[in-house]
Every structure is written in C-alpha cells, then in structure tokens.
Amino acid sequence: MKLRAPVLWLLVAVFAAAPLSAAERAPGKAAIASAHPLASAAGHEVLAKGGNAFDAAVAVSAALAVVEPIGSGLGGGGFFLLHRASDGLDVMIDAREKAPAAASHDMFLGPDGQPQRRLSLESALAAGIAGEPAGLELLAAKYGRLPLAVSLAPAIRYAREGFPLYPRVQANIERRRAVFAKQKEVAAVWLRDGASPALGTIIRQPQLARTLERLAKHGVRDFYEGELARRLVTGVRKLGGIWTLEDLAAYRAVERAPIVGEYRGARIVSASPPASGGIVLVEALNVLSGYDLAQLDSATRKHLIIESMRRAHRDRAVWLGDPDFVTMPVAGLIHPFYAAGLRASLRLDRATPSAALPGVEPPPQGTQTTHFSILDAEGNRVAGTITLNFFFGSGLQVPGTGIFLNNEMDDFSSKPGSPNGFNLVGAEANSIAPGKRMLSSSTPTFVESDTGLMIAGSPGGSFITGMVLLATLDFLDGRSAAEIVAAPRIHHQYLPDVLQYEPGALTEAEIVALGQRGHQLRESGRRWGNMQVVTWDYATGRVEAASDPRGEGEGQVY
Ligand code: GLY
C-alpha cells in the first residue's frame, strides 16, 4: 500500500508524540526528599562526587541516623526499593530486623498470658537483630559507585560537629527522658542537667562518629563479625537482651522481588513481605479500580477509599508475615478478581462493620521511622523506609557505640489477636519465631504512569500504607509533589473499626454523609506522617521534590 505524504507525516507525528517510558529517557537532574535538610545535603554531596542514587541513599540513611535518631539508625532496619535505569531492574533490599535465635513465641506474655508491652517496647528484649548496616553494605557494594567511606563521610561529620536540636527531636527526648537519665553516656549527649536541651543546642555524638568511622575503615562486616559485633553483643546482654555473636554473623540483608500492580494504566511498584505495604496498597487500588472515582461526590469517594483500606488491612492482619517462614496467598490477594469479590460486599450507602468481614482475627503494628525518595540524573531511583520502630527505638543505647537499639520486636504479634503498640492485630503468620522477620507497614513505592513518575513513602506505623494510597490517587489526579505531601489525611486499618481523620481532612458535609453511612468517625488530635515525594513529568521534564510540611525536611532538586 502506498501512503500519501500527509498520512506519512501524521504517522510520524503520532509516533513522535508517543510518551517515552522512563527507561528510555533520563531526567537530567537529581532530586532528594528526606526528613532533614542535612540528610538531603548529604545525598547531594555524594552525587556531586560522582555517586548515583544508590550511593546517595547510603549517605542519606547514615545522615538520618545522626540527625533524626528518633526515626532510624544503625541499630534498626528497613526497606530500600530500587530502580536501576540502565536495565530497568526493580528490586527491594530487605534489611528488616530478625528475631534473635533465643526469641520464643510467648516471650512477651506475662504470667496472666497477656502481652507485656513494656518488655516488647522498652527493654533490650525488644531489639531485633539490626539490619540497616547490612542493607547499606549491599546497596553500596552491588548498586553504588563509591566506596562506603565516601558515602558515610557526611554522617561522620554531622556526628562529630553536631546538628542544632529541632522541636520534633526535642519533644521525643522529653518522652524518653527517664530512660536516658539512667544511661550516663546517653544523658551526656541528649540531656542538660537532666532535662531536654534547648532548641538550637548543638548535639554532638562522638561515640556514634567513631562507630561510623569504624564502618568506613573496616567495612560493615565489623558490625556483624568483628570488634564492633563483640561490643554490641556484650552491651546488649548487659542491658538484659539476648543477642549472640551467632545472631549477628548470620544476619544478611536480602533482595526480594517487589509487589507490582496496575491502577488506571499506571504501574505500581511497592514493598513486598515482610513489608505489608505493597500488598495492602495494590489490593486497595484494585478494589477502587471498579469505580469511576472522578465522577463521584467527595463523601462517596472517601467512603470507598476507607472501605478499600478496611478490606486490605484486614487481609494484612490475617495473612501476612515473613515470607521465609509463612506461605501467603500473595498472588490471590493482589489479583483483580479477588478485588471484584471484595467489591461485592461493599455498599455505597453503608459502612461495612469490620466485625462483619470473614475470618476476623484481630491484627498488630508501628510509628517513628523515616522515609526518603531519591531520583538521580540517569533515572536511578530509591524509595527508602528505615526504622527503629518507636521514637529512639527502646531508648536504650549500646554502651560505647552511640547506637540506639530498635524495639521492632513489638511489630510481631506477641499474642495473635491482641493489639500491639500501633493498635494493630495480627495472626499466627506474624507470631515470634527465632530468626523470623517481623511484619512491617513500610510502603516505599514507585508509581509510573504514561506521563510521569512518583517516588513516595512515609513513616507513620499503621498509617503508612493508607497515606501512600492517598498519595497515589492524588498523583494520578495530577497533583504536584507539594500538594501530595501537604494534603490532609484519612485512615482506616480494619481494627479498631474507626475512620480517623486529620483536622481539616473532612468537610462538615462529608462528616455528616459518612456518619450517616455508619462510619465511626474520630478526628485525630494530631497530624500524622512525614511523607517524602519526588515526581518527574516526562512531557515537561520537570522534576519536583517535596517534604511533608508536618516535618522539617526539605525536598531539593539539583
Ligand atoms: N516499625 C514500623 C513498621 O515497620 O511498620
């Protein structure tokens, strides 16, 4: 067939206008959104030294351990979702903590058979074997370009020279004041005359600086098998913990395939178990894909979002745990047919009581934590959610190291059906066993549409996945990164059966309409989350980085 010239031109034009996939183009600029300006600056520093997004993730994580030690640290763990631009690889590094070999199913139950929250949150028994150092080692060695010593340099500097105390850390020192006062070395850094230091006080952490220097000089294996490992085990055991040298030597960060789904033509890539976020997010989006949300009034739209959260969090509670220990129906949970079945139980005019959903076995979960999102000029990406669980972990520090111990053991279901520190309930799938990873709500996520990309995530324990769900919907509705992180939030986690909302998240009319449907509404006294978002618009080339106004972070584009 002979094509006439105008037709040919039309074909060329259509072809030329077809959106290029992210893999076919590079943004040409880098962006970092993290919970603290010094952490973002650390990432920029290593990018300027020839590092890529993965080196920057190491630098940002290490810097956050210093300047935001309430949220994450070397004594904790986390999840790094990676995208490598050169071959399009998506992979998740699982650096989640593991239960020590001496841990046991009922270790947090008292003589009355009830969970003892103090043990799983405030004692040295609360600490899982730390995974963050191993995660950083794997990131740097397999995906980065720079030696660990270069990527750790900004964090070492911050630990040695100090950072000015800001309100969020000050408030959490106040909450941990009693336990800090009992530890001489901790009190020397974090207290002044037994009280929280004044805002702006320069906090120097010389012991943490020396620990980071050891890792830079001897490598991360020192943490797991060297002199540092011996100090850690001696210190933890003196505090009443059960870590052994064998636990540390056996710890490995592992690579896992992410959860991949699709919503309104956009590709969703998110965290896989032992993080629950990806499954809950994709399951909720699958439920919502059966409705034209844009055509619905705002109360109905919010009702459906809440009902999708309820159902997806219910499955989290019943099914999810460590994939190395439990078999989970993952393919089924994220299948569109399963979502169609869930929609059959969903009414537009009425809330579904959580107790009416089948197989209720009340579920558990966690809050302080931190997230960062990074895009480099080549298109490599990292969404990292790292954590100590609650603020400063347990508040206990391993003597001589500057390392705070996590209290992640509370993310296990100490007793199936009993709520944990985040009011989450869980089933046997998330019970404690030696060497097992506790379930996390972390939801580091990439959303790729034909027109753009979002890298997102947040701290916030059980609230995390709902926040990322709202962010995904907002991004696909065309909202900017700044609008996405600032938007007021609503939440439902199946149990407790309550629709929680931030001040201003619902209008008076929506409150009435949702109440009439039978939702139990509760306005939260505080705002939640600290979302960090990077977006890239393929058509305009515009890259944005935005930090949640609820925190003090700073999104920067370089
Ligand atoms: N520690 C909070 C979480 O990982 O869910």
Image (cartoon, rainbow, N blue to C red):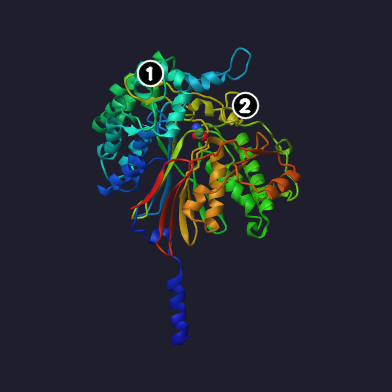
Is any atom of residue 71 visible in this view?
A: no
- Identity of the residue drawn at 64% across and 50% down: 287
Q: How many marks?
A: 2
Number of residues whose C-alpha sits closer than 10 Å to that of mark 1, classed few (under 14), some (14–19) or many (20 or more) = few
Note whether ligand 1 is within 8 Å of mark 1.
no
Question: As displayed, is residue 151 above or below residue 13?
Answer: above
For mark 1, give the secondary structure. Answer: loop
Left or right relative to 122: residue 222: left
- Identity of the residue drawn at 58% across and 17% down: 109
Question: As displayed, is residue 188 above or below residue 480?
Answer: above
Question: As displayed, is residue 367 above or below residue 56?
Answer: above
| Residue toward you, 15 or 125 | 125
The disc label shown at residue 193, or none? 1
In whole angstroms, how far apart are the C-alphas of marks 1 and 2?
A: 43 Å
For mark 2, give the secondary structure. Answer: loop
Q: Earlier in the sequence, mark 1 or mark 2?
A: 1
| Residue toward you, 365 or 345 | 365
Residue 373, percent from left and from top:
42, 46
Q: Quadrant of residue 491?
A: top right
Looking at the rendered image, the disc whose residue lies closer to the viewer, 1 or 2, is 1
Note whether ligand 1 is within 8 Å of mark 2.
no
Is any atom of residue 347 visible in this view?
A: yes
Q: Mark 2 belongs to which amino acid?
A: Pro
Residue 77, percent from left and from top:
42, 33
Residue 19, percent from left and from top:
45, 66
| Residue toward you, 222 or 170 | 170
Residue 316, percent from left and from top:
60, 37
Q: Which residue is mark 2?
A: 416
Q: Mark 1 belongs to which amino acid?
A: Asp
- Identity of the residue drawn at 46% across and 40% down: 551
